[in-house]
Amino acid sequence: MIRWSKGEYSFASPWLMLFDNDRGLISFTDPIFGDKYFIKTPQELIGGILVIYCSMCGWLLIRKQRRRLMFFNPFTSDIRELPGSPYLDTYCFSAPPTSSDCMVVGFTTRVEWHVYIHFVGGQPSWRKFRLNICGDLHSFHFATLYRQNLYALYNNGGLGFIDTGNLDYTWVESPCVSAKRNSLMKCDQQLLLVIVGVFGECVEVFKMNDSKEWEKTRSIGRYTIYISRKACLCIEAKTLEMANKIYFPCLHSKNKKVVFYSLETTRYHTSNVEDESFGDFVGTERYLDPHVWIEPSWS
Ligand SMILES: *[C@@H]1O[C@H](CO)[C@@H](O)[C@H](O)[C@H]1NC(C)=O
């Protein structure tokens, strides 16, 4: 591992970032070239359980055990605490916290169903709205802002949204898609749902269409998806080889390279296309420590 310092690096892809709490290090893996870098974990983040909620433009939204929610940019070491809020299930933010229109949103199923909103450039507090829900809802995941709506997956399957434009906090539900691992993300001008079988044996991508229904798609064109447990990225590929692929936070057990799924071949591969391909996650190692995909950024 190379100690990271600001300089010339390849930014063809987001890096896989891993908090190694035992050693007090944060490591970054470049999935394309396989280079590994590290920095020391800032003192404020050492010790206790760390939860990563969201990743965008080089910023993470994280919470350390018994501390406030905070923004963290590992490339600039900038840490910005947010006002106190209760524990929420899932969060997202609309823009980097350096931007005056950064809005942070969180959902919770504790006691009742609520959505919390904080404007970084505004009052140092959260506004709380009760969601009008009928039915049994016990978890929210992948909060995502898309057009004027705020979406989230609930009970790890169904998709619901709130129309923020009309200040109508009625939760609109769609039927459950499946009970596999689902990830929700914004991609260019579209809302995408990625469903992956528990062992990786199936991968399906759906786009939301104009009638707010999921329509299966076989290609994401020039985009690349990066999956991690709580936060996903979908960005335009910088090289042709990366287009139409889904990267996972897994390494191949033998060659230790990052694993991706090609929507073209419908198989898993590692960075060398000539390497053998495989049909599921057997023979791969998943990251256990807090990890996330991050786009290097200094602003
Ligand atoms: C949206 O997708 C659904 C399900 O695949 C389909 O039945 C419907 O016709 C589509 N609507 C539009 C406007 O494309």
Image: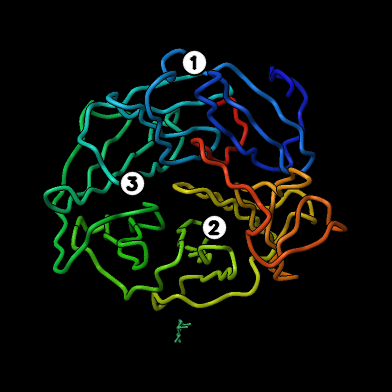
Image coords of residue 159 (percent x, y):
34, 66
Residue 208, position as x, y percentages in the image: 46, 71
Quadrant in which residue 17 is drawn: top right
Type of residue at label 1? Pro
Image side of residue 87 versus residue 294, left or right = left
Indicate which disc, 3 or 2, sits on the residue closer to the N terminus: 3
Q: Secondary structure at mark 3?
A: strand
Label 1 to label 3: alpha-carbon separation: 24 Å
User: In the rendered view of the protein, which quadrant contains the C terminus?
Assistant: top right
SS type, badge 2: strand
Asked whether the beta carbons under mark 1 and mark 2 sit within 8 Å of each other, the answer is no
- Which amino acid, mark 2? Cys
For discs 1 and 2, the disc positioned in front in the rendered view: 1
Q: Amino acid at mark 3?
A: Thr
Instruction: Compare marks 1 and 2 and give the one earlier in the sequence.
Output: 1
Circle 2 Cα neighbour tier, 10 Å, few/some/many (<14 / 14–19 / ≥20): some
| Residue at x 16%, y 56% (from the top left corner) | 131
* Badge 3: residue crowd in 10 Å (few <14, some 14–19, many ≥20): many
Mark 1 Cα shell of 10 Å, populated few (<14), some (14-19), many (≥20): some
In the figure, is residue 23 to the left or right of 72? right
Q: Which mark is residue 42?
A: 1
Camera-side residue: 281 or 202?
A: 281
Q: Earlier in the sequence, mark 1 or mark 3?
A: 1
**Where does label 2 land, which residue?**
187
In front of the other: label 3 or label 2?
A: 3
Q: Which residue is mark 3?
A: 90
Please tell me whether residue 11 is drawn above or below residue 39 in the rendered image: below
Q: Residue furthest right?
A: 274
Q: CA distance from mark 1 to mark 2?
A: 32 Å
Residue 205 relative to residue 3: left or right: left
Residue visible at 29% across and 44% down in the picture: 106
